[in-house]
Protein backbone atom coordinates (compact mmCIF):
# COMPACT_ATOMS: atom_id res chain seq x y z
CA UNK A 1 0.00 0.00 0.00
CA UNK A 2 1.18 3.51 -0.80
CA UNK A 3 2.35 5.56 2.19
CA UNK A 4 -0.51 7.94 3.00
CA UNK A 5 -0.16 10.10 6.09
CA UNK A 6 -3.30 10.82 8.08
CA UNK A 7 -4.25 14.28 9.33
CA UNK A 8 -2.55 15.38 12.57
CA UNK A 9 -5.84 15.82 14.43
CA UNK A 10 -6.84 12.23 13.57
CA UNK A 11 -3.41 10.99 14.64
CA UNK A 12 -4.04 12.66 18.02
CA UNK A 13 -7.09 10.43 18.61
CA UNK A 14 -5.03 7.32 17.96
CA UNK A 15 -2.38 8.56 20.41
CA UNK A 16 -5.08 9.18 23.05
CA UNK A 17 -6.47 5.67 22.53
CA UNK A 18 -2.99 4.21 23.07
CA UNK A 19 -2.15 6.45 26.03
CA UNK A 20 -5.31 5.41 27.91
CA UNK A 21 -5.34 1.82 26.65
CA UNK A 22 -8.81 2.15 25.14
CA UNK A 23 -10.56 -0.88 23.73
CA UNK A 24 -11.40 0.07 20.16
CA UNK A 25 -13.32 -1.21 17.19
CA UNK A 26 -11.68 -0.31 13.88
CA UNK A 27 -13.62 -0.29 10.64
CA UNK A 28 -11.06 -0.71 7.88
CA UNK A 29 -11.01 -0.50 4.12
CA UNK A 30 -12.54 -3.47 2.29
CA UNK A 31 -15.16 -3.70 5.11
CA UNK A 32 -12.79 -5.42 7.53
CA UNK A 33 -13.25 -4.98 11.30
CA UNK A 34 -10.60 -5.33 14.00
CA UNK A 35 -11.27 -5.02 17.74
CA UNK A 36 -8.89 -4.92 20.68
CA UNK A 37 -6.92 -2.73 23.06
CA UNK A 38 -4.91 0.11 21.49
CA UNK A 39 -1.29 -0.42 22.54
CA UNK A 40 1.13 1.66 20.48
CA UNK A 41 1.91 3.37 17.18
CA UNK A 42 4.81 2.04 15.12
CA UNK A 43 6.59 3.71 12.22
CA UNK A 44 8.40 1.34 9.90
CA UNK A 45 11.54 2.11 7.93
CA UNK A 46 9.48 2.96 4.82
CA UNK A 47 7.58 5.57 6.94
CA UNK A 48 4.29 3.62 7.05
CA UNK A 49 2.55 3.96 10.42
CA UNK A 50 0.68 1.21 12.23
CA UNK A 51 -1.59 1.02 15.26
CA UNK A 52 -0.73 -2.00 17.40
CA UNK A 53 -3.85 -3.70 18.76
CA UNK A 54 -3.91 -6.43 21.41
CA UNK A 55 -6.78 -8.84 20.85
CA UNK A 56 -5.20 -11.93 22.34
CA UNK A 57 -2.24 -11.45 20.04
CA UNK A 58 -0.59 -8.27 18.85
CA UNK A 59 -1.80 -7.13 15.45
CA UNK A 60 -0.56 -4.20 13.35
CA UNK A 61 -3.13 -2.11 11.46
CA UNK A 62 -1.85 0.40 8.93
CA UNK A 63 -3.23 3.84 9.84
CA UNK A 64 -4.10 4.63 6.22
CA UNK A 65 -6.52 1.65 6.23
CA UNK A 66 -8.66 2.97 9.12
CA UNK A 67 -12.04 4.30 8.01
CA UNK A 68 -13.56 4.75 11.48
CA UNK A 69 -12.52 4.11 15.09
CA UNK A 70 -15.05 3.57 17.90
CA UNK A 71 -14.09 3.35 21.56
CA UNK A 72 -15.48 0.50 23.63
CA UNK A 73 -14.10 1.83 26.92
CA UNK A 74 -16.67 3.44 29.25
CA UNK A 75 -15.92 7.11 29.98
CA UNK A 76 -13.57 7.47 27.01
CA UNK A 77 -12.69 11.01 25.92
CA UNK A 78 -14.29 10.37 22.51
CA UNK A 79 -16.74 7.82 21.12
CA UNK A 80 -16.31 7.60 17.36
CA UNK A 81 -13.94 9.23 14.89
CA UNK A 82 -14.35 9.05 11.12
CA UNK A 83 -11.08 8.99 9.17
CA UNK A 84 -12.44 8.75 5.60
Image (cartoon, rainbow, N blue to C red):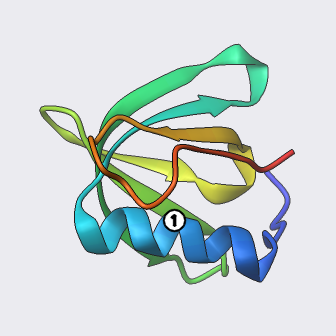
Q: Secondary structure at mark 1?
A: helix
Label 1 crowd (10 A; few <14 / some 14-19 / many >=20): many
Instruction: Tell me residue 31's x, y (percent).
Output: 71, 16
In this rendering, the answer to whether 45 lies above or below 6 is: below
Residue under numbered circle 1: 14
Point 62% across, 29% down: residue: 27
> Which quadrant of the view contains residue 21?
bottom left
Give the residue furthest to the front.
75
Q: 81 or 31, which lies in front?
A: 81
- Quarter occupied by residue 7: bottom right
State the image coordinates of residue 40 (x, y, percent, origin top left). 33, 69
Image quarter where the C terminus lies is top right
Residue 19 or 80: which is nearer the viewer?
Answer: 80
In front of the other: 33 or 59: 33
Is residue 17 rendered to the left or right of residue 83?
A: left
Q: Position of residue 81 (x, y in %)?
A: 67, 48
* Rendered view: 40 above or below 67: below
Q: Is residue 55 left or right of residue 17?
A: left
> In the rendering, at what x and y percent does residue 33 appear?
53, 21
Figure label count: 1
Q: Residue at x 29, y 74 (%)?
A: 19
Is 53 left or right of 16, judged from the image as shown? left
- Name the residue at the left extreme: 56
Residue drawn at x 78%, y 50% as measured from the top left = 83
Check the image and name the residue furthest to the top: 31
Residue drawn at (84%, 66%) of the image: 4
Eyeballing the image, is 75 above or below 30?
A: below
Relative side of 71 to 65, left or right = left
Amino acid sequence: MKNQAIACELHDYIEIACMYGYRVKLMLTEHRIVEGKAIDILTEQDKREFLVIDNGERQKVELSEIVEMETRTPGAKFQSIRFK
